Amino acid sequence: MDIKEGGSQRSQLAEVVAFAADAVPAADAQMTSCRLYPGIGVNQTCACEQGLDPKALNGKVIARAGLEHDAILPAVTMIVLGDEVLVGDQNNYCVRAFPLDGSAGTTGKGRDAAGTCGKSCDSQGCASIGSPPVAAGKRLGDGFYGNGLRYELFKTPDGRVLLQDMNTETIDYGTNPQGRTQYRTVPIEPGPSSVYHVPTFHPSGDKLLVLESFSLNGYLLERSGAAFGSGQKLIAKEDLQGFETLPDNYFKPHPTDVQGVPLQWAFNANGTKLLALIGFALKTGSEFEDHAFVEFDL
């Protein structure tokens, strides 16, 4: 959510909204006070562009209070665990849990489910990144110099919560995570660096697919005891490069170099196929200009 906090100051705020499976689609609320000007002669509204409780959203807020405001990157990751939703809030250095029934509403701050809210281990975390597993400490890293790093929350096939802690360590929080509590690390080493995104387990449970942040390659890592590493490059960055003809207000449309980046992916039931949501951005750098679902035969 984009909100104003006094005068012209703006901030970003995350909240979790639940929708009924049979919810009526939201109608355009015809709001015109948009943060981003749509352009000369463009007839466009911004029903969900800014502010809390957008009109006609047709959802129920189940988590808001307790999540920190941030001008650039508010809390952006969550998972469902039992009857709670866990939200990774890197700005508050912890994970908060909120009831799925919505009883926390807009004012309940939830409970601490990982880390120690308000206190961090600074940019290098509390524990070693590599093998063997070690005590993780009761705090999480702050990622202040990480340029967009965030807490990556994901679950093992048997329901254990893992958290990748801002380019520092991956921690196993078990099936009932608690804040201000000591847990142990799970070494996950893609190779080029320790920074990874979209971690997804293979149906076998013994392999973990991650997107390594710097190379943008997808590595399928092998389990070795409590650690994951020594994997194969399953999806190469070069395989997702291409050209796209984009509309332009000033020049005749022409082919433009784009780079695909996996945003989400999932294996089929027997692990023979991978379905990926790919975002395409200019190779020179830009926001995502387009998206596509891509199916890979493995």
Image (cartoon, rainbow, N blue to C red):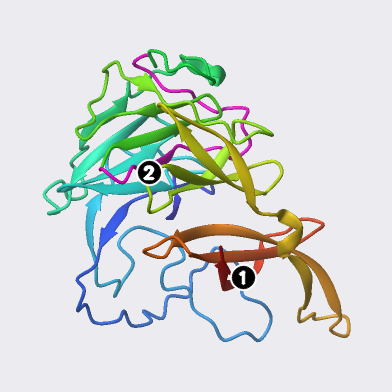
**Quick one: SS at disc 1?**
loop
Quarter of the N terminus within the rendering: bottom left
Q: Residue under circle 1?
A: 37
Q: Quadrant of residue 110?
A: top left
Which badge, 2 or 1, is on the more N-terminal residue? 1
Residue at screen point 30% across, 71% down: 57
Measured as percent of width and height from the top left, residue 145 is found at 63, 27
Measured as percent of width and height from the top left, residue 96 is found at 28, 36
Residue type (three-letter) at the residue carrying disc 1? Tyr
**Number of marks drawn:** 2
Measured as percent of width and height from the top left, residue 148 is found at 59, 40
Image side of residue 125 versus residue 119, left or right: right
Crowding at dot 2, Cα within 10 Å, few <14 / some 14-19 / many 20+, comes out as many
**Quick one: SS at disc 2?**
strand
Tell which of 78 and 90 is nearer to you: 78
User: Is residue 10 visible in this depiction of the protein?
Assistant: no
Residue type (three-letter) at the residue carrying disc 2? Phe
Q: Residue under circle 2?
A: 154
Q: Eyeballing the image, is 48 above or below 218?
A: below
Residue at screen point 80% across, 81% down: 249
Query: Which of the labelled discs sits on residue 186, or is there none?
Result: none
Q: For the magenta stretch, what is the residue range?
A: 137-158
